[in-house]
Structure formats: C-alpha cells, structure tokens
Image (spheres, rainbow, N blue to C red):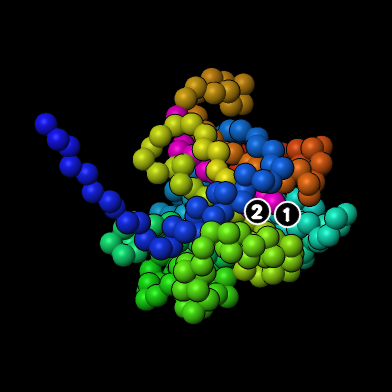
C-alpha cells in the first residue's frame, strides 16, 4: 500500500519566525522558570469587569511587565559596540496576535510603544486594535516596525545568507532594533490550549517573557492551605546585557507586581 504525501506551503510571514529562531541560538540567554500566584489579581479583574472596566488579564500582565522594565532600564538595554549597553527611557514591548494570513493562523508581531506610560485600558485597546487591523499585504505583517510593503516583500525574497547579514546589521544598531522590534518581548503562546507547564521560547530581545496556562492547585495563603491559581512564567534575559544578581531583582519585581495585583487598586 503506497502512502501519498503533499507539500504544504506556509505563509511567507513565517520566514521571519524561522530567522529569529536561528539568530536567537547565538544569544547568551539565561532562562528562569517561575510561578506567580495570581488568584487575588484575577478576582480583582473579574470584579472590575462586572463594573464595566476596560481591563483584561493579558493587558494587566503586560502593564506589570512594562512598569517593571520602565523602572529597570538595565534589564532591557541593547548591546552597543564591544563594551557598551544602550539603555532607553521608554519601554517598547513586542507582542504577537494570531491572525489568518493566506488561509493559515499565523502569530503576527506588533510593537506596543512606550508601554510603561500607558494604562491597562490603553494597552488593552491597542491589543484589540492589532487583532482587528486589516491584513492587506506583507507590510502589515509587522505593524509598528516601520517596515512597509516593499521592504517586507524584498526581505521575504532574499536568500537566507543575505537575510542573515541583514539581521547582523540590524542587531548591531541598538537604535534601529528599538525602533523596529522594541526591547522587550511578551508572548502568551504557551497559554493556548490549556497545557500546563512552561514554554521556553527563542528570542533576540534582551528581555523575553513567555506566559503559560493558569493552573489551579493547593497553595499557602495567609497561613492556610487553599486552592490557588498559579501562572507559569518563563523569563529570559540576555547575560551580555545584565548580570545575574541585578536580573534576579528585576524578576522578583515582576512576580511581586503580579501577586500583589499591581495597579488594580488605582
């Protein structure tokens, strides 16, 4: 009995995903697998929604990350030359939303500008706008990056070794990286499908946070054992940009904000 096969061609937009995966292998990244007790925060968000507030768990999580990064520019600085690191006074976060491109679901990146100075409602509105924005051509595959249709079409048509040279040139210019890609990456791909556990992504950003699915399990709260809701987080930092102890303090800041319901009582 013969088995017939067929070739499935994925959308051209996945070319960038493959390139990032390859380039990221060369980064000196360190990954931390953490858990945040978000039980109280989720209750507050549910209560705010019942009152008609424009809030979502994802937008609030992004707010927590943005505020932490805004207060610690050293964790999302970009290498500048052999011995320098360029730090920025604003936090630009790269996010992904799933869109249908050429008949296939594809994660489309976009850059949330100056996220550290935006409210949860403003962040939510921008995420929703990115999800509903029309996909007309290749220039729409990376909204907020400054790349237009001609530039994207040219990029996809280049052979890998030329695209690699282009990536090296890009990563050698911290201002260009910040303008096109942001300095922080937040991905919630691990939360899709309800799979419990940690996702370890590949990233060229100096700070990358991957969000898993919330898990209900026994935990200790106020001296009592109760069923709590825990959020798995993978936080990746670039060891060429920041040392271990300062990075650990920043990671603790993210966890503290998530567990204390940062900004939800404002």
Q: Mark 1 touching mark 2, by CB under 8 A?
A: yes
Residue 234: image location, x then y, percent: 59, 39
Residue at coordinates 55% horizontally, 49% vertically from top-left?
21
Point out residue 143 in the picture as x, y percentages from the top left corner: 50, 70
State the image coordinates of residue 119 (x, y, percent, origin top left): 59, 63
Q: Is residue 12 magenta?
A: no
Q: Nearer the viewer, residue 45 or 217?
A: 217
Quadrant for the C terminus in the image? bottom right
8 or 58, nearer to the observer: 8
| SS at circle 2 | loop
Q: Does the rendering let one see residue 182?
A: no
**Quadrant in the picture for residue 194:** top left
Dot 2 surroundings within 10 Å: few (below 14), some, or many (20 or more)?
many
Residue at the disc numbered 2:
205
Q: Residues within 10 Å of mark 1 (few under 14, many from 20)?
A: many
Question: Disc 1 on helix, strand or loop?
Answer: helix
Residue at x-position 69% and y-position 42%: 29
Instruction: In the rendered view, tell whether residue 116 sits above or below residue 220.
Output: below
The mark closer to the camera, 1 or 2, is 2
Q: N-terminal of the two: label 1 or label 2?
A: 1
Residue 84 falls left or right of residue 32:
right
Residue 137, compared with residue 210, is above or below; it is below
Residue 204 in magenta stretch? yes
Residue for point 83% across, 60% down: 81
Q: Which residues are magenta?
A: 203-216
Q: Which residue is mark 1?
A: 76
As drawn, the residue found furthest toward the right would be 83
- Quarter in which the N terminus is drawn: top left
């Amino acid at each position: 009995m013969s088995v017939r096969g067929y070739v499935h061609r994925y959308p051209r937009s996945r070319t960038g995903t493959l390139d990032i995966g390859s380039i990221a292998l060369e980064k000196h990244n360190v990954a931390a697998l953490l858990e945040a007790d978000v039980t109280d925060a989720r209750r507050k968000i549910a209560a705010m929604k019942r009152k008609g507030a424009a809030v979502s768990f994802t937008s609030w999580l992004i707010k927590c990350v943005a505020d932490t990064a805004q207060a610690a520019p050293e964790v999302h600085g970009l290498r500048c030359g052999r011995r320098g690191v360029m730090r920025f006074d604003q936090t630009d976060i790269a996010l992904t939303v799933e869109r249908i491109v050429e008949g296939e679901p594809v994660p489309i990146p976009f850059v949330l500008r100056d996220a550290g100075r935006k409210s949860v409602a403003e962040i939510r509105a921008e995420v929703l706008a990115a999800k509903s924005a029309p996909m007309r051509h290749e220039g729409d595959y990376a909204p907020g990056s400054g790349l237009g249709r001609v530039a994207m079409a040219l990029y996809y048509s280049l052979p890998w070794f030329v695209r690699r040279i282009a990536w090296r040139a890009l990563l050698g210019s911290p201002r260009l990286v910040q303008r096109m890609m942001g300095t922080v990456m937040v991905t919630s791909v691990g939360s899709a499908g309800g799979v419990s556990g940690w996702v370890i992504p590949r990233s060229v950003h100096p700070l990358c946070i991957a969000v898993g699915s919330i898990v209900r399990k026994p935990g200790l709260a106020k001296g009592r054992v109760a069923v709590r809701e825990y959020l798995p987080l993978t936080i990746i930092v670039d060891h060429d940009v920041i040392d271990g102890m300062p990075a650990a303090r920043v990671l603790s800041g993210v966890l503290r904000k998530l567990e204390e319901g940062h900004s939800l009582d404002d």
